[in-house]
Amino acid sequence: MGPLPSASDGLARHAHDPDVGGHFGRFGGRYMPEALIAAVDEVAAEYEKARQDPEFLDELDRLQRDYAGRPSPVTEARRLSEHAGGATILLKREDLNHTGSHKINNVLGQALLTVRMGKTRVIAETGAGQHGVATATAAALLGLECVVYMGEVDTERQALNVARMRLLGAEVIPVTTGSRTLKDALNEAYRDWVSSVGHTHYVLGTAAGPHPFPMMVRDFHRVIGLEARAQVLASHGRLPDAVLACVGGGSNAIGIFHPFLDDEGVRLVGCEAAGDGVDTGRHAASITGGSPGALHGALTYVLQDEDGQTVESHSISAGLDYPGVGPEHSYLAEIGRAEYVPVTDTEAMEAFRLLCRTEGIIPAIETAHAIAGALRLGRELGPDATLLVNLSGRGDKDVETAARWFEVVDPAALPTTEPVPDDAAAGEREL
Amino acid sequence: MSTGAGARTGLTVLDEVFTTARAEGRAALIGYLPTGYPTVAGSKGLLAQTLDAGADLLEVGLPYSDPVLDGPVIQHAVETALRGGVRTRDTLEVIESIAARGGRAVVMTYWNPVLHYGVEAFARDLAAAGGLGIITPDLVPDEAGDWLDAADRYGLGRTFLVAPSSTEQRIASTTAATSGFVYAASTMGVTGARDAVSDTAPALVARTRAHTDLPIGVGLGVRSGAQAGEVAQFADGVIVGSALVSAAEHGRAAVARLTTELAAGVRGNHTGR
Ligand SMILES: Cc1ncc(COP(=O)(O)O)c(C=O)c1O
């Protein structure tokens, strides 16, 4: 086997780029305030230069290799396979990246871009906290000021990641408006950016938002699929029958799907968070249970009521608890190239338990949705099937939620879920 | 400019708001309040009060769940309205109530509620209700194809925004797509009353004038008669939002008092702060 593709290979231009306005079919584009158009134009122009600049590409590859630990391995899950109709299950191990998830791929790229643009401050929104941790990490590495917006509900259920971000020197601002989750953190990040755009880059954490973010974030994550495709071909001498990933905003999914788009026989399956069940209305399955609308900068599938008001999403997984989805997924769903299936909280937690017990891997609860999708598809397709699953992140951050779910420890021994204090009010001691 | 033989469209009336003010040697006063704050009936009353106390044009805000361009005051008001169950059709009803009193009003709305209602249907129903146009804070002309057509068909004004960060090229293309009046966002930031009028506003207005003869309204941050007077020196319209919403928390009398002060301000008669 030759050398694996590098992160920089993900940035090469290709036939699946959107039009100049950032449209994937009718989806995407820029549904956003004029005040920020200059900023996204600057990002788009800088990204176009960077993706053709050998110095930038070398630096990205160096960081991905020496700092983040790429390439990530593919692990064959032999014992899990018994629970998936005997199908071969291959796990793309993004959980082994530095900071514990795929998020670092995008963040290293955007942080380098921030430096190129001469900006000194980054802001980010985060749900599970993984993107916030990755952004805080890259900011520390490159000497950038970092502010992370996080819904108050999420600061409670992902308290460990709040602590990680603060240890890394980032300021974490709990967002108390609206549903106090990821969507509201995005709103606050936009509000910050409108007034700080002169010196601040908004490191959007998923393949959503206005052009060029869906394309650029995708490109920084394409390395996942590029590597995995080569790895599976080398180890199994064939392409997988299906590629599965969980879909929040859709960055880990688009990253692993994209290099397989032209492989017609390969099914692409996005696993959306169905919460209590799509028919209960308490879910976060934007494609399965939503309709096209404009949210956070793009035309895409959105959970909305009969007046176009965004509906609150629900999921046990903070990172999937978002009422929108990246526009390219809306497009792939509409043209039928990818399929999107709902996975409930209960199914995801059962898959979480199985992966822990059969493979010794504690996944992120987000990721557990993809595992659940693979178990279901494996049982359907049987032992001849080969399924590639994006193991987008590890579950350290979710140990408390899982411990409660499975009642593996005395609830009294777990921390209470007091709101995380504002930084201003936090401990006296200087870090 | 006018669409049919002698037809008075919303856009014609909107143009008159500014030509009248200009003839009087002053800027127009434009007041914003959202539908449904504190209730639908309450907002009708507050808007009527604003009109009676001297606003030339009303901006009726259509509450939206994700108002990314709004600061805490307006966020709070629209959250209250939404919690109270306000619907898109309530805004059309409020517009109708203003038109029935001889008032002039446009809708200020984030784009998704209009997309969901149907761009064509919303334009039709807004025109039927007597509304004059729409201000679209998160829609740029690049994505507005359907709305450009619908506005022409129903004779409605299309107010797009320009910002201090807008390039010359974008000011040119944005004003070319605009009708009625241009909205100049005076600062890089969200809505909210500020102590001082931004010093970027006069420069933005001057840059915008180089590209268009349309009237230019300046918004974001005006809260007093003195500030209104300052803005009236260089703009054709003074837009007041958060300050009116704050006043609305104290009732109709407070709204009337502030509007009276602002109306004096745009006439150069303000009595200091
Ligand atoms: C481990 C992990 N997987 C998946 C997601 C969902 O994001 P996306 O859909 O952009 O991959 C998150 C988000 O926080 C995450 O932390």
Image: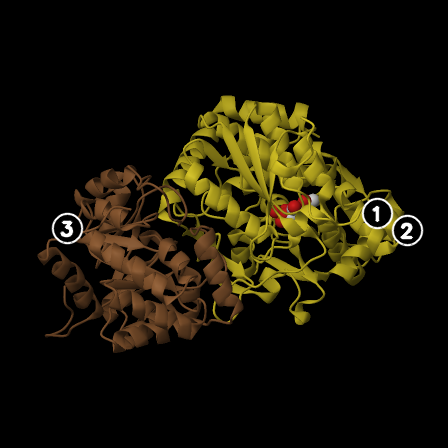
Chain colours: A yellow, B brown
Query: In the image, is residue A220 above or below residue A358?
Result: above
- Quarter of the image where one finds residue A102: top right
Circle number at residue A414: 1
**What residue is drawn where x is 48% and y is 42%?**
A192
In which chain is the residue bearing label 3?
Answer: B
Residue type indicated by callout 2: Asp
Q: Residues within 10 Å of mark 3 (few under 14, many from 20)?
A: few
Query: In the image, is residue A131 above or below residue B141?
Result: above
Q: CA distance from mark 1 to mark 2?
A: 7 Å
Closer to the camera: disc 3 or disc 1?
A: 1
Residue type indicated by callout 1: Leu
Please name the residue that numbered disc 2 is placed on: A410
Question: Is residue B107 rendered to the left or right of residue A135?
Answer: left
- Quarter of the image where one finds residue A38: top left
Relative image position of residue A362 (x, y in whole percent): 81, 44
Closer to the camera: disc 2 or disc 3?
A: 2
